[in-house]
Image: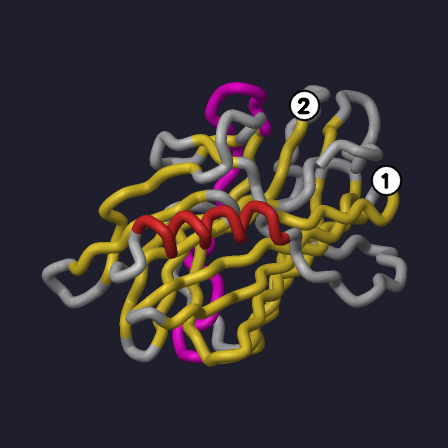
């Protein structure tokens, strides 16, 4: 895989060939992230940690001076969840907005608590479906300059089991390798992800994972991932965003 780091603007959005005008992205839902933050503030007020949706990562210092996962857990309880690479279950704390059968918009919040300061990054997916391909627009933004890099993949949504990766984008890292307040990147429907959505009647989503932050010179690796809305991919017709199916 080639490594290509993209310098600012920080945006990840999925938009179709004939994408209609979309209103400004509303703020993500508070429940999942706030539950995770309350857990961190209550249980680890003097430690460094992150929250991605409902996934809490307690950080520890590494030999190279960076911070990485020491403990990973879900903070959302026994409701229906989707898995991640660390073996915990989580419900994505994202705002999913279906525009129509072929367009959807979702936003999720990444929170880092370092040296008793809270940093927030809002990550947005806008997806436009075309047959079994997707135009994927990604955007992240932050009030404070940060670096955020990530990998991108397509996953099958599996109920009550770990989700399955069906395609990993060839580019190893997306995002900004230098501090910035925003970043935008689009993977077109005819690009490297062309026709990578299976035709089997199951649900699929785009997943920004392998998250790495750099804030005030401190490098942070966190568990969890940012997920797009779910698309159902039929055998004989185009993938679609079904009403009420996020």
Q: Are marks 1 and 2 in contact (CB under 8 Å)?
A: no
Q: Where is residue 111 in the image (x, y as percent from the top left)?
A: 46, 60
Mark nearer the N terminus (1 vs 2): 1
Secondary element type, mark 2:
strand
- Of the numbered discs in the image, which one, if any, rests on residue 101? 1
Judging from the image, the colouring scheme is secondary structure
Which residue is painted at 79% across and 67% down in the image? Answer: 24
Q: Find disc 2 in the rendering and name its residue.
A: 202
* Res. 182 in view: yes
Against 90, residue 40 (above or below) is: below
Viewport quadrant of the C terminus: top right
Against 126, residue 116 (above or below) is: below
Against 121, residue 167 (above or below) is: above
Tally the numbered discs: 2
* Res. 164 in view: no
Q: Is residue 86 left or right of residue 181?
A: left
Label 2: how many residues lie within 10 Å, few (<14), some (14-19) or many (20+)?
some
User: Which one is in front, 21 or 145?
Assistant: 145
Q: Position of residue 174 (x, y in %)?
A: 48, 61
Q: In the rendered structure, which segment of residues is drawn in magenta?
A: 157-179
Q: Does the magenta stretch include residue 48?
A: no
Secondary element type, mark 1:
loop
| Residue, far left | 63
Q: Position of residue 120 (x, y in %)?
A: 50, 67
């Amino acid at each position: 895989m080639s490594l290509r780091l993209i310098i600012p603007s920080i945006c990840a959005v999925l938009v179709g060939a004939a994408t209609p005008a979309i209103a400004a992205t509303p703020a993500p839902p508070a429940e999942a992230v706030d539950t995770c933050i309350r857990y961190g503030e209550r249980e680890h007020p003097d430690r460094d940690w992150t929250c991605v949706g409902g996934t809490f990562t307690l950080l520890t210092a590494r030999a190279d001076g960076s911070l990485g996962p020491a403990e990973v857990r879900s903070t959302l309880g026994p409701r229906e969840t989707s898995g991640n690479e660390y073996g915990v279950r989580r419900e994505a704390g994202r705002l999913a907005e279906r525009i129509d059968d072929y367009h959807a918009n979702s936003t999720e919040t990444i929170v880092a608590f370092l040296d008793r300061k809270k940093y927030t990054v809002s990550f947005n997916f806008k997806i436009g479906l075309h047959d079994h391909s997707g135009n994927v627009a990604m955007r992240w933004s932050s009030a404070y300059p940060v670096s955020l890099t990530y990998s991108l993949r397509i996953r099958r949504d599996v109920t009550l089991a770990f989700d399955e990766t069906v395609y990993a984008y060839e580019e190893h890292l997306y995002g900004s390798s230098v501090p910035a307040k925003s970043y935008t990147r689009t993977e077109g429907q005819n690009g490297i992800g062309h026709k990578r959505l299976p035709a089997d009647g199951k649900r699929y989503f785009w997943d920004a994972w392998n998250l790495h932050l750099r804030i005030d010179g401190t490098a942070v690796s966190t568990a969890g991932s940012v997920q797009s809305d779910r698309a159902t991919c039929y055998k004989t017709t185009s993938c679609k965003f079904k009403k009420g199916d996020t």
